[in-house]
Amino acid sequence: MMLARVADSLYWIGRYVERAEHLCRLSDVMLNATLDQSDGAAQVARIALTAVGDPDPVRALSPYEAARTLTLDREDLGSVTSSLARARENARQVRDQITTETWERLNLIHLRMSGPDAAKQFAEGSSAFLHETIAELHLFKGAADATMSHGDGWRFLVAGIYLERAQLIGRLLEVCFGDRRRPLDDHLALVSVLRMSCALEPYLRRYTADIRPQRILEFLLLDDDFPRSLRFCTARIEEHVSALSRYVEAAGHAGPERLAGRLRARLQYADMEELAAAGAAGFLATLLDECAAIHGAVHETFVAYPLELRLPA
């Protein structure tokens, strides 16, 4: 089993990279929505900013300023630039555990985002800047998958990616579909939610142009094959966490593999008719709470584990 600090760094690389990609996509969708003159554009901005934890999304001066802040503000610890800086620092600390191709790709993205020309490039073409950043992050993930040995280090990195993704998509769904008093029915907003989840084309292949809130919720929650659905993410989380947990025997607390298995089962056997009748708010809140519990258990088991934690006989 690898050192706790190495496992922690690899896990957080995955989380920060996924977070950066999600923020880029939300910013891009928010900017594209401003081209539409309908009232839906303001709703898209509200959804995007609320989903990333802005306590007062209406205070943004404009979608452009909000997107620029989400992308480039170095003082904001949750921005794309800050997330990539943290990912790169974690990668530097475990340089011997990742491949040259993976390190170089992440280093290039970080230097581009933190360089003196980043603000100018964003101003000259914000959409192109965000698209290029997303593409480079895809290349980083591809390099990690194609060049790293698929052992423990890779599993920690990928577990971080999928746990972060599950929480981000879950939070987006909670904002959009968790309040029955404010049902989301604007066409632009619904299409934008699919774009924020990188799900528009897969959804259209499944349902054609029949864009309905209930179908969007079902697709992003329960689709077996779409890699950003909650069901798909939780299956991968259980897969990787269970493989890592074979090395340890936890004493006194629920191991992450048990929590991940319970979450996967909750989504595996979820029924959309029951969910529609009861409302999505409680179900989504439970999913997010369980994701947070898995994160805590991963940290407790593999990073800050107690003395009672021991290797199995």
Image (cartoon, rainbow, N blue to C red):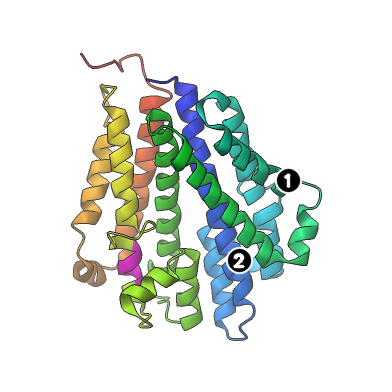
> Mark 1: which amino acid?
Ser
Residue 152 visible? The answer is yes
Give the residue at mark 1. 114
Where are the magenta residues, as a range?
216-220
Q: Split into 4 quadrants, where in the image is the N terminus?
A: top left
**Side of 253 relative to 108 (left or right):** left
Q: Secondary structure at mark 1?
A: helix
- Number of residues whose C-alpha sits closer than 10 Å to that of mark 2, classed few (under 14), some (14–19) or many (20 or more): many
Measuring from the top left, give residue 248's x and y in whole percent: 29, 22
**Residue at point 49% right, 76% down?**
189
Q: Which mark is residue 28?
A: 2
Q: Exactly how many numbered labels are in the figure?
A: 2
Measuring from the top left, give residue 101's x and y in whole percent: 57, 37
Q: Split into 4 quadrants, where in the image is the C terminus?
A: top left
What secondary structure is the stretch in magenta mostly built from? helix
Q: Which mark is residue 130?
A: none
**Residue at point 32% right, 46% down?**
236
Q: Quadrant of residue 125?
A: bottom right
